[in-house]
Amino acid sequence: MDTLNTIFSRKPIRNYTGEAVSPEQEALILKAANAAPVGMGQYDTVHLTIIKNKELLSEIDSTAAALMKRPDSHPLYGAPELIVVSVKFNPSTEGAGHANAAMIDHNMALAATELGVGCVYIYGAVAAIRMKPDLLAKLHLPEGFTPSAGLAIGLTEEKYVEREIPTDRISQNIIV
């Protein structure tokens, strides 16, 4: 798959077989995270937490469902792994932390797409983690780090295929 085909094929996967990705696939996805651009090269301001513990995933899933007032939903979609991207915010450049997390999340999603691994961006569950101190403590984050983004991954029977992308989704203006 070439880069543009990967970009045009990426989509959220919300159906998982329950099987974890292989160690080799996970290593490539995490390598893609480390290849992401981070503002001013400050990689010490980002941290990844790879959650595979079924009990913790279930707790995150149910907490997020309750906070979204949809107790019967499953915001992690049954994915067997959640990668949480946490950032250490600098008060003068707080937005950069979220941008860094988004870039890392997206790089991992593109790598997963390239590998045929199911993935979906996760925000609601990440917000739920932030709102529950006891749950946040279970991530054992370094001092000063806050969860900002997440990516659920796992094996799926869905396939990625290049899709038609409308070019007018985002408004634009041209200044000459």
Image (cartoon, rainbow, N blue to C red):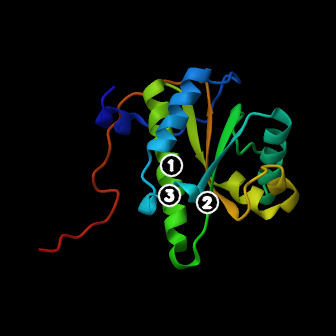
Q: Position of residue 164 (x, y in %)?
A: 32, 38
Q: CA distance from mark 3 to mark 2?
A: 8 Å
Residue at 44 percent across and 47 percent down: it is 36
Q: Which quadrant of the view contains residue 165?
A: top left
For this orientation, the residue located farthest to the left is 176
Q: Are marks 3 and 2 in contact (CB under 8 Å)?
A: yes
Task: Please give left or right for residue 23 compared with residue 136 in the image.
Answer: left
Residue at 60 percent across and 68 percent down: it is 89
Residue at 79 percent across and 51 percent down: it is 140
Q: Position of residue 161 (x, y in %)?
A: 39, 27
Q: Is residue 141 visible?
A: yes
Task: Please give left or right for residue 70 compared with residue 158 in the image.
Answer: right
Q: Are marks 1 and 2 in contact (CB under 8 Å)?
A: no
Residue on which the image places disc 2: 87
In the image, what residue type sits under mark 3? Answer: Asn
**Label 1 environment density (alpha carbons within 10 Å; few <14, some 14–19, many ≥20):** many
For this orientation, the residue located farthest to the bottom is 92
Query: Tag 2 or tag 1, which sits nearer the N-term?
Result: 2
**30 and 121: which is toward the camera:** 30
Residue on which the image places disc 1: 104
Residue on which the image places disc 3: 100
Query: Tag 2 or tag 3, which sits nearer the N-term?
Result: 2
Q: Position of residue 136 (x, y in %)?
A: 80, 56
Q: Are marks 1 and 3 in contact (CB under 8 Å)?
A: yes
Which secondary structure lies at badge 1? helix
